[in-house]
Image (cartoon, rainbow, N blue to C red):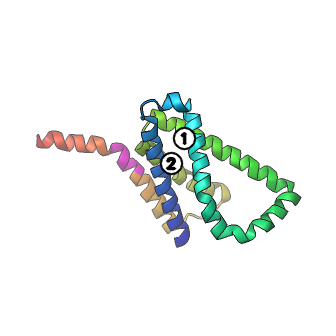
Amino acid sequence: AWSALISACIANLFAAFKGNENKKLMETDGLKDRMGSVGNQFALTTILGFLMSIPLVLLREGSKLGQFADLWKTNPILKTNLIASGLWFYGYNELATMTLKKTGAVTQSVANTAKRVIVIVGVAIVLGESLDPIKLLGCGIGIGGVFLYSIIDQLLSKKAEKTA
């Protein structure tokens, strides 16, 4: 459980970093003329992410590539599911990048956190899993953080008005 939590935290950190860098890139003068669209920017970001992950994949899973190739050749369900999963993931993330253009990196990061909490609770309900106290605490922290972020500007502006 701890390794999953730590891995999720690292993934969130890199997702927020990617969102922040994408937003900076979108604000670069002349970028739209050079790239054409946000979709193209996302495609380039995805290709770069893929290329940078190849060494880690080979290091961690390289010994299993032969088994994967054999399974790929013999299991049509694996092919269909893997391709469909990749297309959905790519489409979702391209939409997220387009949303980032209209919002901000922090807003998108908060929305991503809220989405994950909603998915965790929703899956637990659908699958009939119990929500142990530790799971509820984690969801509560996530929801509380999202709520606090959404009202923090109002709270700070009221405090500044009172002291002024």
Q: Which residue is under mark 1? A: 96
Whole-percent x and y of residue 119?
58, 52
- Of 86 and 8, which appears nearest the observer? 86
Q: Main secondary structure of the magenta part?
A: helix
Q: Which residue corresponds to the image point at 43% horizontal and 43% vertical from the top-left?
A: 105
Tag 1, which secondary structure?
A: helix
Whole-percent x and y of residue 85? 71, 49
The answer to whether residue 56 is seen in the rendering is yes
Residue at image coords 48%, 32%: 31
Q: Amino acid at mark 2?
A: Asn
Count neighbours of disc 2 (C-alpha within 10 A) and say few if under 14, some if 14 to 19, many if 20 or more: some
The image position of residue 92, as x and y in percent, is: 61, 42
Residue 122 at least partly seen: no
Check if mark 1's residue and mark 2's residue have beta carbons within 8 Å.
Answer: yes
Could you say whether the residue bearing mark 2 is in a helix, strand or loop?
helix
In screen coordinates, is 114 left or right of 39? Answer: left
Query: Label 1 amino acid?
Result: Ala
Image quadrant for the N terminus? Answer: bottom right
Residue of label 2: 112
Nearer the observer, 77 or 134: 77
Range shown magenta: 146-151
- Distance from label 1 to label 2 (Cα)? 9 Å
